[in-house]
Image (cartoon, rainbow, N blue to C red):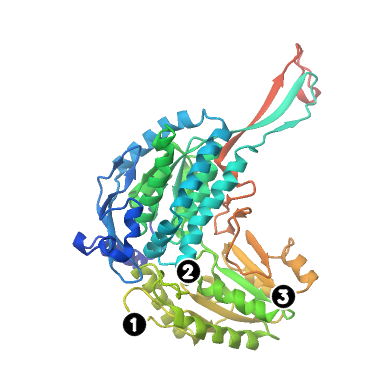
Amino acid sequence: MPLFATKSTQILSLCKKVASFHRMSTSTGEFLINDPKYSFLKDLGLKATNLGVYDGSWKGSGDSVQSICPSNGKVIAEVKQGTVDDYQSCVKASEEAWSVWAELPAPKRGEIVRQIGDALRNKLQPLGKLVSVEMGKILPEGVGEVQEYIDICDYAVGLSRTLAGAIYPSERPGHVLMEKWNPLGVIGVISAFNFPIAVYGWNSAIAMVCGDAVLWKGSETTPLVSVATTKIVSEVLERNHLPGAIATLCCGGADVGKAMAADPRIKLLSFTGSSAVGHNVGVEVQKRFGKHLLELGGNNALIVAEDADVDMVVQATVFACVGTAGQRCTTTRRLILHKSVHDEVLQRLKKAYEQVVHRIGDPLDDKTLIGPLHSPLSLQNYENTITEIVKQGGRIEFGGKKIARDGFFVQPTIVTGLPHDSPLVHNECFAPIVYVLKTESVDEAIAWNNEVPQGLSSSIFTQSIGNIFKWIGPKGSDCGIVNVNIPTSGAEIGGAFGGEKHTGGGRESGSDAWKQYMRRATITINHSKELPLAQGIKFE
């Protein structure tokens, strides 16, 4: 199967339609960047037509792609993408820049990352607005995503002074046994549309203090965020008389992603996207014995035990289900309710949805709580899933319809009546659809949580110490993120972010995720005049 092929020719056809949509012809004078409402775009150094490749200088010899605003369907601006030849120039420049960057002491690299964080602070509002306009999430979430990059920069600065090795006791007299970590070299980052800046930030800030150069391919549908972010980072590097190619960018299509996966010069490839595509990426990287970091699909469950605080449950569930219009990888997809609280939670959740549905709209509007889906493909997937739910006997308790207005807006949707093991329930539709399931016990709920292929995030609401320790124990949730009395979404940067099974097994951000960006060397130093062998072996 080709690297970026999908399992369905129907999905492939839809992808081609989206690509065509984003390459449609619109006069530059009609672009939103020329509308006074969006003047902040020019504060980020963006123009009506932008170059999408940076290897120390800006260029781009591929197709021009028009970035579409999902809240109105209008063109924001356009970006001239890179080709595989442009990618090759990025890799070459990255390797040359790495030889300079790796020589700097880690605390000096941390100082540069600190300056990047400060530069992002100075552009927090306009960059956050760009994320909202181009991706579709509401402004507090757009600004929050940029803040997440700033926070990980702060974290990385501290890390730059604590990248610890180890010394172990040697069994041989006059010997020292130690462990040291060194940078990998050039690493690649392929990020997705739903977090167009934060995922890059998680990877790049940590990788940079570890001594790696970073080559970024952002989503085809959020190229302006990629360009604006790279401008901020490159200005910091150049101001410090460092090669800008320490952080290169190659906006492009599947051909660029395929080249990154197959290229042995990319020592680690971080990929965020669907499980189907991530599987192909992982296989391709493994063919060359490269390292990969996969952040893939999630089918996240929130369990409500019979002793749960229902007020907390309803408040947490609304954001977990409808925040970012259901387009977070940690969005709650399955709500597993104990039979004793099922009816109450369902009715209260429907009432809460009735309140927020009136606050769907322009992500830049302060009153908006839910923005649009990101693209025509997202909208089509939502409508196809609703049709299939009804066909299979599911009950639409709330929502289930496209909203008749410009842009790609839909109603957040609550579904009952499908069995826990329905293929629909086990499939992740990247939209605000939650399946409500009734369970007899916490044990049964845990089994349902674990039966899906994905293993990203999970949560239980309970007051029982026994339930809590069962949930976080060896026979509890099999996900990478295991929460108690908080929703499935909203992870902090201090912990390692990622999941198990078809979610890919990768870990980004905090904890010891930094080790993925470095190579470990076990070192034995003999400072004596003797040559004893380990395990007492005599060879005389």
Q: For residue 31, which numbered disc appears in the image?
A: none
Q: Which residue is mark 1?
A: 404
Which of 493/175 is in front? 493
Report helix, strand or loop for mark 3: helix
Residue sitting at x 60%, y 71%: 301
Sequence-wise first label, 1 or 3: 1
Q: Report, in whole angstroms, how far the alpha carbon at label 1 lies from the one at label 3.
A: 41 Å
Q: Which of the 4 image quadrants contains residue 407? A: bottom left
Disc 3/disc 2 C-alpha distance (Å): 29 Å
Classify residue 248 as left or right of residue 160. Answer: left
Mark 3 / mark 2, whichever is N-terminal: 2
Three-letter code, disc 2: Thr
Q: Secondary structure at mark 2?
A: helix
Where is 237 relative to 140, above or below? above
Which quarter of the figure has residue 315?
bottom right
User: What residue is shown with label 2?
Assistant: 324
